[in-house]
Image (cartoon, rainbow, N blue to C red):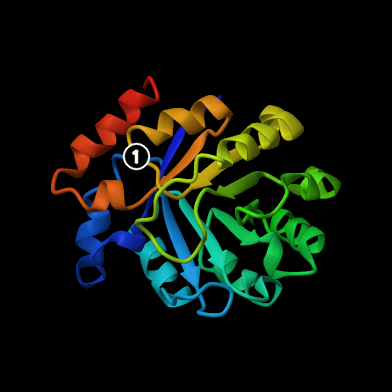
Amino acid sequence: MEYKISASILNADFLRLGTEIDSVASLVDEIHLDVMDGRFVDNISFGAPVVAGIRGAYPQTVIDTHLMISKPHQYWRDFVEIGSDIVTFHYEATDHAYVLLKQLREAGVQAGISLTPATDVRLLEPMSAFIDRILVMTVEPGFGGQSFEPQMLRKIEAARTLFGDRVDIEVDGGINQHTIAQVQSAGANVYVVGSFIFAAEDRSARIAQLREALGQ
């Protein structure tokens, strides 16, 4: 199984966003972009123009776009057309999850679906044929810098048991050099890391710590 670090820019300095991404782009496997609308979550981040700018500036970087928005079925196409490699939406945000997963696949991107801490992963079983990635939120979504919720380890284990090795199990929330090993053991193979990386002056050292914890 391939283990991947996805650097979340939510805790980066937005005034120096290009410099911030430059400091990590060659060291991580993906850049994770949290698009928030202030409705599905109580925060507003950025939208399609920022994602498009990042895509244009980093054409070789894998862009992991996480739609933390209401009615993702109305907006997903914008993020595909500007070049996202992976588009993940929340199960809780739409009544059209099955259709949206199928549309993402047909559009040629990896189709991801995310679950908030309270949502049972078994609800995804009926649509499993169209899922490339399951994003398990290990904190309540909306803000970076939160503490990891250890009870989510069982949910990660359940997801890996249900879906096997054919999907990526991604985790987001409170990931650092200690918790990354815990979620790896539970079955996760993609790790969204924000404040642990961007709060440090030496980002290279922080990413090296994460890879060491993963045995890489």
Residue at position x 67%, y 28% from top? 165
Residue bearing mark 1: 176
Residue at position x 65%, y 71% from top? 72
Q: Residue furthest left?
A: 201
On the rendered image, what quadrant is the C terminus found in? top left
Question: Can see residue 113?
Answer: yes
Q: Secondary structure at mark 1?
A: loop
On the rendered image, what quadrant is the N terminus found in? top right
Label 1, residues with CA under 10 Å away: few <14, some 14-19, many ≥20: many
Question: Can see residue 109?
Answer: no
Q: Quadrant of residue 75?
A: bottom right
The spot of residue 35 in percent (x, y) is 49, 69
The spot of residue 148 in percent (x, y) is 44, 46
Q: Considering depth in this image, is 88 or 147 the residue closer to the camera?
A: 147
Using residue 204 as the reference point, say whether residue 111 is left or right of it. Answer: right
The spot of residue 30 in percent (x, y) is 42, 46
The spot of residue 31 in percent (x, y) is 40, 52
Using residue 170 as the reference point, say whether residue 193 is left or right of it. Answer: left
Q: Is residue 123 above or below residue 57?
A: above
Residue at position x 72%, y 53% from top? 105
Q: Quadrant of residue 166?
A: top right
Q: Is residue 89 above or below residue 148?
A: below
Q: Amino acid at mark 1?
A: Asn
Using residue 136 as the reference point, say whether residue 103 is left or right of it. Answer: right
Residue at position x 34%, y 52% from top? 194
